[in-house]
Amino acid sequence: MPNLSTSRKVKIATRTFKNILIGRPVTVSFEITYNCNARCEHCDLGDYIKEPRMKPEAFADWIDKLKPGVAQISGGEPLLRKDLPNIVSAMRQKDGIAVFVLTTNVSLMNEEKYHQLREAGVDQFSFSLDYPDERHNEFRHLKKNFEHIRDLSRRLAKLGNNDIVLACVVQSDNMHDLPKIAELAKEWGVTVNFSTYNCLRTGKEHYLVNTEERLKELREIVDKLVLMQSNGHPIVTSEWTLRQMITFFETGEMPGCQAGNRFLIVNPWAKLTPCGMVRDRYESQARMKRTFTAGNKCAKCFTAIRANSEKTPYRLLVDALRVVRK
């Protein structure tokens, strides 16, 4: 949990519960570019995409309208936008409450940019990490990326801001490495969050955990992660969410998707899209709800943005109190 004042935490919680009641999103992901310098095996982005260069105010206008509890700033790779600090600053001027989380593959991140972005208004930095060693570089097609994440995480952690979280997508070929990644997070002085792979973007079903043998192993791994968490390892994913991941892999679905309601995306055109897998464009949340959300039957993902925004108010409160107490 990043270092936030008590009054701001209360305002974030109040806004979150209010948004649930009135139908505004809990989380909005601002995908400010679809371009990326990585070629990740579990993602369909990475090639050059011709897109507009929307001004920072275009994204700031949406955070003012939607007023989420959490604003994720991502891509593609958001650091490809040279005006990223200006985008963050414009958004922060419109909203002093929401938690701003920057999601990055870290390849373009350094200490200078970290300080610039913190000054602009970023509260937390989410560093994508898929393996606890050099396999990560091959998977992301980024040279020395693992080593850079390791070294930069250690240096930034020493600043004491508690604002670095490793983001790991759980899939069949890295699930045995999850305890090791949790160990690295503790060693580096950062936290780690786990989310669930789905094949909607790429069709690569071999990354799914969908055999009884693998599911049995995953249950044992989750049991170990829960024990590690209770013993002080900095795993921010709640036990409830970890066990929901098993359910998703077991059944191949997670019904009740609230894309367009609990969460949505502002895309590089400064239009709204329901989620990272459905990139239709809408001019307003109201229209998205009428034409997409009302008839949405998709159940084929359980991404972090779903897992964290679709919780019941009770579960949100329980998980939030757990993190705050730590």
Image: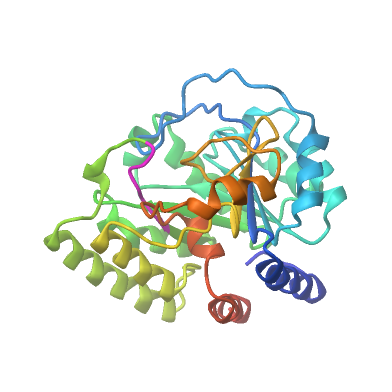
Q: Residue at x 50, y 42 (%)?
A: 276
Quarter where residue 251 is shown: bottom left
Nearest to the observer: residue 69 or residue 285: 285
- The reply to whether residue 288 is visible in this rendering is yes
Q: Residue at x 30, y 73 (%)?
A: 224
Nearest to the observer: residue 191 or residue 24: 24
Quarter where residue 41 is shown: top left
Task: Residue 39 in the image: state x and y as whole percent.
Answer: 41, 29
Q: Is residue 223 left or right of residue 92?
A: left
Q: Residue at x 82, y 75 (%)?
A: 7
Q: Is residue 129 left or right of residue 190?
A: left
Quarter where residue 89 is shown: top right
In which quadrant will I find the N terminus? bottom right
Nearest to the observer: residue 262 or residue 292: 292
Task: Residue 212 in the image: state x and y as whole percent.
Answer: 13, 62
Q: Is residue 8 left or right of residue 213?
A: right
State yes or no: residue 49 in magenta.
no
Task: Residue 282 in the image: state x and y as whole percent.
Answer: 64, 38
- The reply to whether residue 102 is visible in this rendering is no
Nearest to the observer: residue 21 or residue 267: 21
Residue 241 vertical position relative to residue 78 in the rendered view, above or below: below
Residue 272 vertical position relative to residue 240 in the rendered view, above or below: above
The colouring scheme, among rainbow, by chain, secondary structure or one colour, is: rainbow
State yes or no: residue 198 in magenta.
yes
Secondary structure character of the magenta stretch overall: loop
Q: Which residues are magenta?
A: 195-201
